[in-house]
Image (cartoon, helix red, strand yellow):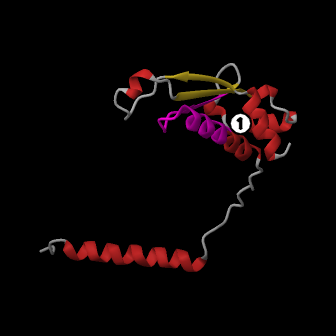
């Protein structure tokens, strides 16, 4: 699935709800519902089962018990801009969930770096020893 198709799918199938938002705005903030809550059912995204699992694992803390990706956006005073931001964030989160991550190859510190570390520890130790009272 390419990026334009995914964006269109999010736009069509995302369940939007609106609420009153906090923050600056004076009297306007008390009258208008500018906060956007976007709910996307992950199971219905047209991806392979393997890709859906990868998205589930990557976004586990943002997915509720019904399997919906939940995104809140209330950063601007405009409902339209908040909606666009929520949809863009959903797209970016799903895209990052689909990317393969390289496995970390464990490495060992070099001999020179170990020697530098030990040498700095000796210098620090000697400095602290020189601060002590001489033993009589």
Quadrant holding the N terminus: top right
Which residue occupies the foreground of this view, 45 or 99? 45
Residue 74 on image: x %, y %: 50, 34
Residue 59 on image: x %, y %: 66, 36
Secondary element under disc 1, as helix, strand or loop, is helix
| Residue 114 appears left or right of 129 | right
Quadrant holding the C terminus: bottom left
| Residue 130 appears left or right of 3 | left
Magenta residues (range): 69-90
- Please name the residue shown 71% across and 47% down the image: 96
- Please name the residue shown 33% across and 73% down the image: 125
In magenta segment, residue 75: yes
Numbered-mark total:
1
Residue 63 on image: x %, y %: 65, 28
Quarter of the figure with residue 9: top right
Residue located farthest toward the top when viewing the structure as drawn: 66
Q: Which residue is mark 1?
A: 57
- Please name the residue shown 40% across and 27% down the image: 29
Which residue occupies the foreground of this view, 61 or 46? 46
Residue 67 on image: x %, y %: 71, 23
Q: Does residue 109 sit above or below 80 in this rendering?
A: below
In magenta segment, residue 73: yes
- Please name the residue shown 79% across and 39% down the image: 6
Which residue occupies the foreground of this view, 38 or 50? 38
């Amino acid at each position: 699935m390419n990026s334009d198709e995914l964006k269109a799918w999010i736009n069509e199938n995302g369940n939007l709800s609106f609420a009153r938002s906090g923050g600056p705005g004076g009297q306007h903030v008390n009258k208008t519902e500018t906060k956007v809550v976007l709910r996307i059912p992950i199971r219905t995204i047209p991806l392979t089962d393997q890709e859906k699992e990868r998205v589930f694992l990557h976004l586990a803390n943002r997915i509720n018990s019904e399997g919906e990706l939940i995104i809140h956006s209330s950063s601007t005073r405009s409902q339209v801009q908040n909606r666009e931001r929520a949809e863009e964030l959903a797209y970016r989160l799903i895209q990052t969930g689909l990317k393969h991550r390289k496995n970390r190859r464990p490495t060992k510190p070099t001999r020179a770096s170990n020697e530098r570390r030990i040498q700095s520890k000796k210098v620090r130790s000697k400095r602290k020893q020189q601060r002590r009272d001489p033993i009589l």
